[in-house]
Image (cartoon, rainbow, N blue to C red):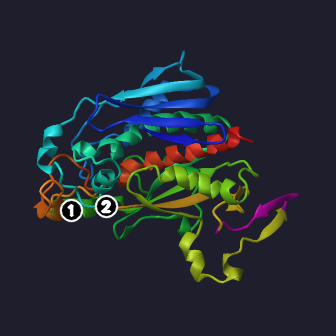
């Protein structure tokens, strides 16, 4: 199990990819009645689709709640999601042979585990309960006028529209109907198709924008809002980088270019640009919170790869079988929204 302990919330995620069920237990939740249908629609965004980028493993991902009465959470509740389409036999030939860039080898170093069926507790499958919790908290935030939206801005070297190119209105993101990118979706899909046909995988970048964020939330140093959000985002497997606002591009700017000027407009202070991504000194400043997330290529690929046999202590070559995403990025979009939602709810409740 993995546990997040925040200022008010505690979120425990449990189970493994090929066990009977996975799930989450939440403590410290606010009293709130959520929309069941809206939650199912949110979870559907994470589910495997009949698409070139997605695994062929199809799961219902229907949440089963405990301590939830008439769709109302209050304090502690749990959600279970049952695994119904496992094929553990696909991993029989990998016993003791860690897949490169998976957690197989590091879990062996920590626990002596030699059985790598479905990635176990390190699998992206555990983002399903993360999204069940995050989907509820997204609704809670929306009632307070805070809206979290993520989208794909890059697949491999194929670039789509980014907030770095200029302001993105919430309505523009809401208009997305299929592949979750604001532009060049066909080119992205074609690139994934080409990569998949070669037995390989590809990563990309997800951007997330928080509209309507309350000002003055967060604090300095270890209590900073960027650190809280980042720690939750890194719970999503395959995430290898997070930046806020103009992020690493700030390193190439002069201070006169990077600074966000302030001005009075209609007797209110406005910050005229948003290189800081809506956060200064770890505290929300009133601008939209903007962030970018780097997602690595799925490690499970069909190409032959070099590894070791930990049982026989020899070098070997493996070719991974089973069902895997050629590109995990599109399905990770709601996972990023969920991580941000949990972080913000914990901060708001802890004020």
In the rendered image, which quarter contains the C terminus?
A: top right
SS label for mark 2 = loop
Please rate how many residues cluster around mark 2, counting C-alpha atoms within 10 Å: few if below 14, some from 14 to 19, many from 20.
Answer: many
Residue 136 image point, x, y percent: 53, 33
- In this view, the residue in front, 168 or 23, is 23
Q: The N terminus lies in which quarter of the figure?
A: top left
What span is in magenta?
A: 265-275
Which residue in the structure is indicated by mark 1?
Answer: 200
Q: Does the residue at mark 1 contact the one at mark 2 (Cβ under 8 Å)?
A: yes
| Residue toward you, 30 or 319 | 319
Of callouts 1 and 2, which one flags the residue occurring earlier in the amino acid sequence?
1
Q: Where residue 191 sits: x, y (%)?
A: 26, 64
**Which one is in front, 281 or 47?**
281
Taking the spot 28% from the left edge, 56% from the top edge, the residue there is: 105
Q: Is residue 202 visible?
A: yes
Mark 1, Cα crowd under 10 Å, few <14 / some 14-19 / many 20+, is many
Quarter of image, res 59:
top left
Q: Is residue 47 above or below residue 101?
A: above
Q: Is residue 146 visible?
A: no
The disc at residue 297 is 2
Percent from the top left, x then y, of residue 156? 33, 67
Q: Residue at x 29, y 62 (%)?
A: 202
């Amino acid at each position: 199990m993995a546990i997040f302990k925040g200022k008010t919330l505690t979120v425990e995620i449990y189970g493994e990819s090929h066990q009977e069920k996975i799930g989450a237990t939440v403590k410290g939740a606010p009293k709130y009645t959520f929309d069941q249908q809206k939650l199912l629609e949110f979870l559907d965004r994470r589910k495997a689709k009949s698409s070139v980028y997605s695994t062929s493993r199809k799961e219902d991902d229907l949440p089963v709640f405990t301590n939830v009465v008439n769709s109302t959470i209050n304090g502690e509740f749990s959600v279970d999601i049952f695994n119904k389409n496992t094929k553990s036999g696909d991993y029989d030939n990998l016993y003791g042979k860690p897949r490169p860039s998976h957690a197989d080898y590091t879990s062996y170093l920590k626990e002596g585990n030699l059985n790598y069926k479905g990635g176990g507790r390190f699998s992206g499958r555990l983002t399903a309960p993360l999204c069940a919790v995050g989907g509820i908290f997204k609704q809670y935030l929306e009632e307070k006028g805070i809206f979290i939206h993520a989208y794909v801005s890059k697949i491999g070297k194929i670039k789509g529209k980014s907030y770095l190119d200029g302001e993105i209105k919430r309505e523009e993101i809401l208009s997305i109907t299929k592949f979750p990118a604001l532009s060049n979706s066909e080119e992205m899909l074609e690139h994934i198709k080409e990569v998949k046909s070669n037995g390989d995988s590809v990563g990309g970048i997800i951007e997330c924008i928080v509209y309507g964020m309350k000002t003055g939330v967060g604090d300095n140093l270890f209590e900073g809002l960027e650190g809280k959000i980042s720690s939750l985002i890194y719970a999503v497997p395959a995430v290898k980088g997070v930046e806020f606002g103009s992020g690493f591009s700030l390193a190439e700017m002069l201070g006169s270019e990077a600074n966000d000027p302030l001005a009075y407009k209609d007797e209110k202070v406005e910050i005229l640009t948003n290189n800081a991504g809506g956060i200064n000194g770890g505290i929300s400043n009133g601008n939209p919170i903007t962030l970018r997330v780097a997602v690595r290529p799925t490690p499970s690929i069909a190409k032959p790869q070099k590894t070791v046999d930990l049982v026989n202590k020899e070098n070997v070559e493996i070719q991974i079988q089973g069902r895997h995403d050629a590109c995990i990025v599109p399905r990770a979009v709601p996972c990023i929204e969920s991580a941000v939602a949990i972080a913000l709810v914990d901060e708001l409740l802890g004020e």
